Amino acid sequence: MSPPASTPATHVVPEGFKPPKVTHNTRVLPGFKLSLGLTITYLSLIVLIPLAALIARPWEHGLEAVINTVTDERVLASLKVTFGISFAAAIANLFTGLAVAWVLTRYEFPGKRILDALVDLPFALPTAVAGISLCTMYATNGWIGSLLEPLGIRVSYTPLGIFVALVFVGLPFIVRSVQPVLAEFDAEVEEAATTLGASPLQTAFRVILPALAPALLTGFSLAFARAVGEYGSVIFIAGNMPFLSEITPLLIVIKLEEFDYAGAATVALTLLSLSFLVLIVLNAAQLILSKRGQK
Amino acid sequence: MSAKAARFPKTPAAIGLTLFVIAWMVLVIILPLANVLFEAFARGVAPYLTSLAHPDAISAVKLTLLVAAIAVPLNAVFGIAAAWAITRFEFSGKGLLLSILDLPFTISPVISGLVWVLLFGAHGWFGAVLQDAGIQIIFALPGLVIATILVTLPFVARELIPLMQDQGTDEEVAAVTLGANGWSLFFRVTLPNIKWALTYGVLLCTARAMGEFGAVSVVSGHIRGLTNTLPLHIEVLYNEYDSVGAFAAATLLAGLAIITLILKTFLEWRFAGELAAHRKH
Amino acid sequence: MSLIVSNITKTFDHFPALTDVSFQAEPGEFLALLGPSGSGKTTLLRLLAGLDQPNTGTVQFDGIDYLALNPRDRRIGMVFQSYALFRHMSVAQNIAFGLTVRPSKERPSKSEIKATVERLLKLIQLEDFGHRYPSQLSGGQRQRVALARALAINPRILLLDEPFGALDALVRKDLRRWLRQIHDETGVTTIFVTHDQEEALDLADRVVVLKSGQIEQIGKPVELYHRPQTEFVFDFLGSSNPAPARVDGDTAHFDGFSVPVISATPLNGQKTTRFRPFDTQLATEGAGFKAKLVSVLPAGPSLRLELKGADGTLYEVHQAHDSNAADLKVRDTVYIRPTKVYAF
């Protein structure tokens, strides 16, 4: 009987071998039990137990009730509105966000720093404030709404309003994902493409854009995930017409106000599961894209 | 690796793209912000001040500050503990812990409010027990606080973890060999090294805590003068067609957002090296 | 007050970093742990400081079981390879740290701490740098601050991990002499880790040579150099040339000549002996290893010649600048004759 190959009888030290550097030693630095205990307790109380309730509550009236709730026309319509418009807004931000990131990293112009700082406004501005401001702006007597009215375009109180709100909310995610990659993009690679005879447009589309793809996808995922759950900036401008412009988070609130806890939990769990599913797919795609880049 | 230096746009395409981006930023970001001010002062300064001086508005401001004053320190302490555990020790399940830590970023704010109603609401798991004991959580301050804590939980930890990972343990280990105990180690070596990142995390956490709408809306019950935070106060006024009142209150939060952006930009500019290398919101 | 390390074994994920390591450091001794990377020398240092625990074995200092002591209580001054200075503290605050974190009962008074810091700043010749921050210092200055910080706690033992690793050659030599001087002044038992044999031989009272987690030899620099006990020690301490010979007790027999052989134990039979570049004579004729000259380079006090034997063996030979080797030209045929060889 030969010994298993994985346990060699003698240990051969490879050339230049360094034993793994022990940077984290559970014995030397104090506070392991205290900090980990605190962390786990806090996360359990604030995140895990509440989530357990969310996962457990839908089933209290049986599986049939869950299926009935999920297949309810109004719920399905709200999911379609939520995911459809979130997707459309994230796509729109993909292009405009890339343009913003490109201009902010590549060009110099007066007021650039302020513009750069303002990209984060949707992160910082409370959603309710954004909601009422957008709603007023795009109402038929608002700054923008009054300009669109003669063209027959109505934004506030229509699905288009939801789109406008989600574009506002999602912009910084794309810009801030792409910006660092673009800023660190090796100038020599671009110059190499030029010396090989590529036009600026060819360089942009065949050299730079593929390198940005993973970052773009990351930004897209973040913007999309945020949009699906968005509430404050949407409900004012949406009009909230069932089947037409009613988003799923609002439906959860409505069910809760009717004291239909199980129903609210069911819709919430559905929304959460679907958005996780989309995120998993996007993450997988992102992983494939970024692996392709690093050989 | 050197990036291309930024310069003034020269080609027609570059000028066109730059102008488009400026126009887009004006439309998407600047106009909605300007509109808040415009609507708030639509009928002049007096109505603006009157609506801000209204008792409901004042109690909303107080409540907002109170909620943030409870939620932010708790999340800051948690963030430090989590960052210490995660970056200073090896243990199994760390990846899972990090994923759980990120969950509040992915969950809809409405769901972050809903879960507390499912636990503590009238028909919640602990609803009956709490009612017997005479404790009110939902539609009361505790509900607002825990909903805010859940929504803003990752901010401080997420800011500290990459930085502390980068800084490594060299200085702390050296302090141990010099005889430092746990607390002097933390207060004299660790804390001074992470103070700006901590400030940054607390800033983002505070801004979000004061502006949170969805989660708070679900647990608040919208009782005027009692459980209405500033964002909820805005909603109530707006739905009652008190546009000036709503936008006047909104200017407070918009001002907070601008201050946040200014401080954030300042911290990023001044202490770039002492903040986490990459941003994640 | 000697440090006694006995039978230390340490494994990382089934990889044996240290196997049955035992040695003793006498009071006031300056000891070097010498070995290539991966030899376990840094691991050994970390075990002494209490930053890692061995699987088996004991560490005793002055009769105290050191493994049972918390690293905080060992009073071991450790100078880290990265220096690990506190970046937000001034030089003076860095040096004072170990004193100011003591429990209030054992803490020296403010004026005492100030006096200690000033004394140490003078010792490391940075009197005027107390208010500077680590980022404002050069590599050599940081290293000296790290040393002062470790000395401030009045350590029982001073440990230095590759103390000159991150410095350029010029600074390194200066600091080396200076470190020896500090050691002689303070008299602290000092153990330092290095992969540089020249540094170890130049500085230490005794050298512990490590290879793959095991001790190859312990001895004074001269002993190691003149009486290497293993082939590894011989090769690690300097350049060497191979020479197959028939060994007969204290003599090695080659084709046409014989030379004395140095070995730890009397050897007999066919052996590949080794000789140093400077234990050689060169001749254009006569007995010796026939080789063609590849290059001649001045190397400090001597000429360094590279030669290629008829069978392809490469030889390195050192000759005085004023020897006949200076007249040789590349591709000349010469005969190399060792004056003494080592066998293991």
Image (cartoon, rainbow, N blue to C red):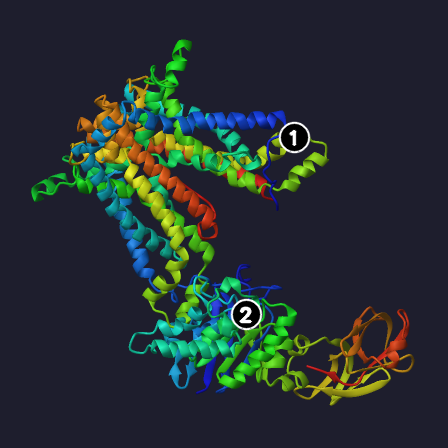
Q: Amino acid at mark 1?
A: Pro
Secondary structure under the numbered disc 2 in the rendered image:
helix
Q: Can residue C52 be seen?
A: no
Q: Amino acid at mark 2?
A: Gln
Badge 2 crowding class, 10 Å Cα cut-off, few under 14, some 14 to 19, many 20 or more, is some
Marks 2, 1: nearer the viewer: 2
Give x and y (percent) for residue B35. 35, 25
Query: For the residues marked 2 and 1, what is the alpha-carbon distance in whole angstroms?
Result: 50 Å
Residue A213 to residue C193: above or below: above
User: For this view, does C46 lie left or right of residue B116?
Assistant: right
Q: Quadrant of residue A142?
A: top left
Residue at figure coordinates x 26%, y 31% from the top left: B249
User: For this view, does C101 lie left or right of residue C301?
Assistant: left
Residue B113 to residue C191: above or below: above
Report which residue position mark 1 lands on.
A200
Q: Quadrant of residue A289?
A: top right
